Structure formats: structure tokens, C-alpha cells
Image (cartoon, rainbow, N blue to C red):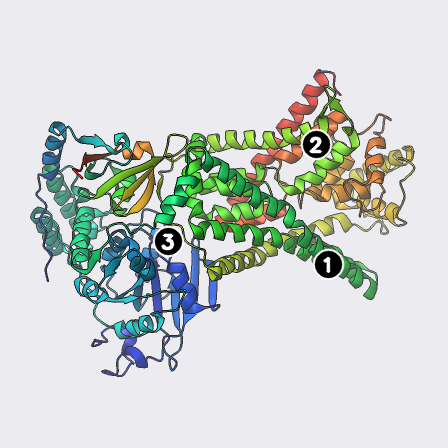
Amino acid sequence: MSFAYAIPDQRNELLERVESFAPATVSLDRLRAGTPARVLAVKGEGAIARRLMEMGVVPGAPVRVIKVAPLGDPLEVRVRNYHLALRRSEAQTISVVMSDK
Amino acid sequence: MSSTLESPSLTEAPAGAGAGRETRSLAVALAGNPNAGKTSIFNSLTGLRQKVANYPGVTVERKEGLWTLAPDLPPAHLIDLPGLYSLDAASLDEQIARDVLTGRIEGTPAPDVIVAVVDATNLERNLYLVTQLLEMGRPVVIALSMIDLAERAKLEIDPAKLGESLGVKVVPVTAKQRRGLDELARAVLDAVGAEAPVAKWRLSTGAENEVRRLYAVGAASREEALRDLYSDELPADAERREAVEGARERLSRSNPQWWQEPLTARYRWIEQVTEGSVRGAQTTRPSTTERIDRLVTHRFFGPLLLLLVMAVVFQAIFSWATLPMDLIDRGFGALGELTRARMPAGLLTDLLVDGVIAGVGGVLVFLPQILLLFFFIALLEDSGYMSRAAFLMDRLMRGVGLHGKAFMPLLSSFACAIPGIMATRTIENPKDRLATILIAPFMSCSARLPVYTLMIAAFFTDKKLFGFISVGVLLILSMYLLGICVAIIVAWILKHTILKSPPPPLVLELPPYRVPHFLNVAQTMRTRSWLFVKRAGTVILTISILLWALMTFPRSAEKPVPDAQEGGAVQAMRETGVEAKGEPAPGTTVQTAAGAGAESEQLRQSYAGRLGHVIEPLIAPLGFDWKMGIGLIASFAARETIVSTLSIVYNVGKDSEADSPSLIEAVRNAKRPDGSPAWTPLVAVSMMVFFVLACQCMSTVAVVRRETNSWRWPLFMVAYMLVLAYAASFVTYQGGRLLGLG
């Protein structure tokens, strides 16, 4: 059984172009609570971006903001069927595209 | 499954019989995400046969237990790794886990088999760690946990198909009902010596070509080539390093986010694996969790509930623990009396009673608080509430530069800093954890209350502000606030200087609520309290004996040898002794105990008494005299000791309580050599301020030593807190005098 999978090398450039055109593209911190979306790109660098991706926030993953903490930060986010608390500053680095459903 | 038995350590096993006939006991590592049910499985497999210690040189907890794989085999050593999301060595836990899996830790053999615990209700994210475990070059068996919850959520997982796609055996396990444990043991025995699995995920063609090129240059395997290319560390070999740098350069030219590729590729593969083996519901989160969270993280009721939970925990450590603590205290007191009665009077008896028995009692008296706090922490942690508390408090704690998880340890420190400091283990980043530890003793703990009580009873009873606000209550409240404010400032300074690190990121899982497992809670309480008794206990006992010696030697009966150096001090002491005799008898209720006078004389003669004199010029600007100095010295063992020490110094017998009328009288009537009162309300406030800020608690020092694994931090803590306490008392006393309050 082989699961060979090819990611086009120009993926990110494409994503950026899509992002600039598609009106449904926002950063995760600006997504309205309850709106289903998919991750388009994680733009951050370093340990935090890596940790986010390890937790399943990779391009294509379904995400949804569930609620905002009482003091306005952090956010409760649903990703890959589990719930994650993220600060706004981290959510800013994640761009998402709203799903149709 | 056929065993290849290639591993050199296994060559003694008869070929073909399967590794099951092993005589050497096997090593098995248990790995998995936090909240995946790993602890429940570990407890079910090992029962009470566990050992908890630290890995050498670090504070990561090392849990090991014995697991009977088959009746005719020696039990296997099961090593419970810390809960992990990844093996990329970003945190200390991850680094340790990686080192254990590769056998690089002294005294911990490389595991023969890795058991990966995978939460069935959260498959995709749990499998991410598995994709990394598959690359460790060891046989892997998957224990699929929470299978009952998955079934309830109408999620169908085909373990056989899942195992086939992953290339390893998958065993569904329900720890609470002990379902699947035998099958897991059999799967582990079958896997011993089997060939390590092969990871099947692939990168883009460009990246794969680079990996192949690195493999050709000298990486030992595809896994090593991948690690060279994508991990932060570069290979030591110059040629290989150059090749890696070249490859990164080429990859980043076509894709600036090139480093994300393995992460994305692993998840793509996971999606393909689960697509073939999982059917049914997309939402596995129980609706009860959603409903509970509607209240628990509610804008208004959430913080209210948190306050309520904290109040219960606080109440428990603060007041419910007092009954068993009194019992322990009295028990050891009685044991001391008994010993004194049965043994001939003398130094040995004194050492045994005042040093050893009092010291052991001083350790054990904290047990009820520690047990209770860890009962609640285990309950809150296991149920899933703890991460909600961090979620609610993060914004506030971040303002100081601390993690949301620092909230709970700091709050428990109001009862006692010892369990509070032990509770900081939930904070992953070592710098954030250290900052939390260093400010925890500023929270006014229960041991300060006797001091506050004595000072207020002596000078502020019945005093009212505007006719109705009790000055005493106001003072105690100000002391609590002072501690909190100083803690906030110190935390801010620490986080911007020696513990400088970026604000801790909050990437925190909010797991579904679960009913806490009794066995897990009991185990946490057991292991934590044992750790405290064993490690902190030895330090506390030592210091307790040392303090006893300081207050006992030289004996008042023997004439101190007046050598050149000591002569002056002794002379000075004799003079003050005369002056002390010149004092008017302090009150009518004094001289209750027959031996009080002798005790008092002994203390004055002792090294502690001399030290009191030596430090008098130093503490005079704070408003303290040498008698208070003795109390301060003794209080570095534990704050409340100042009450009993002052009782001895003022001749009222050492068993006086903080609210004993004779002690209060004695304090009010104590005079300085010039006849002015030794204590004034201003001196009392200065003393209280000193007690808020100084780290006068050898148990705290011992626990910090244990938790940070060095003497550097506890000594730093004592020193900086002492400086702060001195400065604050100085400002209080001198400022007060300038305002005409003295």
C-alpha cells in the first residue's frame, strides 16, 4: 500500500494569490463564532507555528471558532474534532477560508 | 507475527519460540498525547507496583511500573513517558521522551516495544505522535483508548484496518473495565524483536529528492536524513552540514514555508489512513461537554464558578486540614513528652525530642494540606476543568507575563506555598514555571496568621477606623494585598530580566469532561505526598536539628570559653543580661511555667541568642531589638516559630499560643534598655511587613531545591526576598517615624 502524496512546490504562492482574491478569506481571530472554515495557511514562524501545526492546524483542516473567553482573549477553537484554546495573537497568523456548509 | 530477533540483546532467546520465552525482563515505553487515557492504562497495567522519581538532572517526572505480560515471565518494566503532542523536542518533556525512546538516558534501557496510547475519539491529532513514534526504529503497538466513548458517539473504527494501514497492531482497550489488557500484553510479546515499522508518508517530489541526496551524503537512514533537513539542529559532520544547508536553501527558494511540509504531509497521510478505517459520526464531542462548557466558560457565570471552586479548595486546605494537622502536631508533641519521660534527661534526649521528633513532626504536619490539595488538583485535572480555569484566567495572568496555568498554584499558595510550588509542574515552560515558583511564597500563607494574630491582639484590638472598620481586619487585608502587589511586580521584573522569554504561548487543549477515575486520583495523592516526605523531609529534618543545636549550645551551665574573638560577644551578652534583669517584671501573669526562666536563660546564652545580638545593629533600623532578632532567626525554620521563641525570650513558657494573654501582656510590657517600650504599633506593623515578604520557611526552601534541582534558585529566592523584606520594613518603620507614628 502506498500513500505517495505530492504537494506542489508553488503551493504557498498559490495560496497567497487565492487569499488576495477570495473575499471569504480572513485570519482566524476575525472569524465569527460558529462559522465553519478551513485552514488556508499558517503564516507564523518558529516554535509556536510549529506547535499549532503539530496540533493539527495544517492547510485543509476544518476549523471553527466556538467562543471567546470572558476577558476577550483567548479563543476557543474547534479543529479536527477537538477543542483548542488559542490567543488572538496566535489566531492572527492562521488564515482560513470560510466553508460553504 | 514472526520474530526476527536481530537485536543483539535478544540473542539468548531460542529462535522460533517467539520472544515470549525471554528470561530477561523487557522494557516497554508508554507514549501518548495528554488526555488520551494514558495514566488510566498505566495504572491498570501496573496497579500499585509503581515508582515515581525524576530523570537525572531535570525535573521531568519519571514514572515506572511493573507489568506482568505473561504468568511465566518476569514482569516488564513499563516506563510512562510524559504526555506529548510531538517528539520534536521543543519542550523538555519532548526531549526527555525522545531520549528515553532512543536509550540515551542513564539507567533507563531503550524500550523493546513502544506502546502508543491513541484516543479513539480524537484519532487524527493522536495519530500525529504515532507517525513520529513509527520512526524511532522500535516495534510499536497501539492501544486504542476511549473506545467506549467512540461507540457512544456512533463512531465506527475498524482496528484491523487501521492497524493494516499504519503497519502495526491496534488493540482496543478500556482501562476502567480492564477490557483488552490481556490482548495488549500478547501484542507486545508478539512485537518483541519484530522489525520496526516503516513510515509511509511522503513529501513533495522536490523535497523527497533532497532527502535522497542527504541519504547519499551520509545520513544513516531516511529518518535521519529527514531529521537533518527539518530539525533545528544541524549535523556535526561538516560535509553533511553543508549538504543540509544547500538543501534548505534550494527548498526555501521555491517555498518560503518549506519547513511546514513534513507536518502537512504527516496529516495528509493520517487523513488517508482514517478515511479507510473510520466511519460514522463526524462529531465525537459529547453533548454534555458542550452543555457544561456553556456554563463553565460563560462570560459571567464562568468566572463566578471559578471563584466558587477556588473558595472550596481554599477552604479545604485552610480549615479542613487543620483538624488532622492538629492531631499530627499533638501526636508528635505527645511522642516527645513520652520520650522525655522514658529517657534519662540529657543532651541525647533533647536532641531526640526537640531536634528529631520535632523535625519529623514538622515535615508530616504538612501532609494533610498536600494530600487535600493534590486530591483537588487531580480531580480538577482529570475532569478537564483545569484547562478551563487556565482559559478563563489567561488574559489576567498574561498581563504579568505568566501562563494561565500559574493561577492555580499561586492560589493554593495562600494556604501553603509547599503544595502550591509542587503544583507548578503543570506549567511546561521552565522559565514560566520558575517565575511562578519564585513568587509563590509572597502569597500570605496560613503560617503567617499566628504572627498577624499576635501583633494585632497586642496592639490593635478594639481599634476602629471611622468607628466601625476594625483596624486589625484592615491590617490583615493590607498584608495580603501587599504580598499580591509585590508578587506582581517581582513577576514582571523577573520576566523582563533573568527569566526573559517571549510571553508563553497558549496552545491549550480543552478536553471533553470526564468523570475522574478514583484510582488515578488516589495514585496522584500517594506519589506526590511520598515525593514530598522523601525529598523535602530530609532537608527539613537536617535544618531542624541544626536550629535545635543553635538554640541549645553552648549550654548555659558550662562557662563559654572566652577566646579572643568570642570574649567581646560574651561580655556584651553578659551586660545585656544585666540590663534585661533591670527590666521591670513584665506583667503579673508572667512566670507561669517553672522552667521558663531557665529556658529563657539558656536561649540567651546559645549561639542563636548571640546571633540575636550580632544582628541587632542591622535590625535596629527596622525597629527590632535583639530579642526579636532571636525570634527572627528561629522563624527562618518556619514563620510560626517566632511565637514560641518570643514566649521563651519573654519568660512565659514555650507552649504559649499566639493569643495567649500572658504572651500578649509580655509583648506589650517588654522594655528596651532605656526603659522605652520595645514594641510599639509601628514596630508591630514593621514586623508584619517583614513576615509578608521574607522567605522564612525551610520547607519552602527544601521544596524549591527539589523542584528546581539545584541550590541556586532557593538561595536566590531567600536572598532577594530577604532584601525586599528588609527594605519594606525599613521604609515602614522609618517612614512611620518621620510621620510621627513611632
For the residue labelled by badge 3, is the local secondary structure a helix, a strand or a loop? loop
Name the image quarter holding residue B260. top left
Report the residue at 34% width, 64% height from top: B29
Q: Tell me if B691 is positioned left or right of B241 in this view.
A: right
Residue at 23 percent across and 61 percent down: it is B157
Q: Nearer the N terminus, badge 2 or badge 3? A: 3
Separation of disc 3 and disc 1 at Cα? 41 Å
Between B731 and B180, the one lying in front of the other is: B180
| Chain ID at mark 2 | B
Q: Nearer the viewer, mark 2 or mark 3?
A: 3
Amino acid at pointer 1? Gly
Is residue B544 rendered to the left or right of residue B348? left
The first of marks 1 and 2 along the sequence is 1
The foreground one among B47 and B134 is B47
Residue B544 horizontal/vertical position (percent): 68, 52
- The answer for which chain carries disc 3 is B
What amino acid does circle 3 point to?
Asn
Crowd class of label 1 (few under 14; some 14 to 19; many from 20; radius 10 Å) = few
Task: Indicate the position of residue B310 as horizontal and vertical percent values.
Answer: 53, 41
Q: Is residue B253 visible?
A: yes
Label annotation for residue B426: none
Residue B554 vertical placement versus B152 (above, below):
above
Q: Is residue B565 visible?
A: no
B309 in relation to B340, above or below: above
Q: Which residue is mark 2?
A: B687
Estimate the x, y position of residue B381 in percent, counting from the top left. Answer: 45, 50
Residue B345 falls left or right of residue B247: right
Q: Chain of mark 1?
A: B
Mark identifier at residue B331:
1
| Callout 2 amino acid | Met
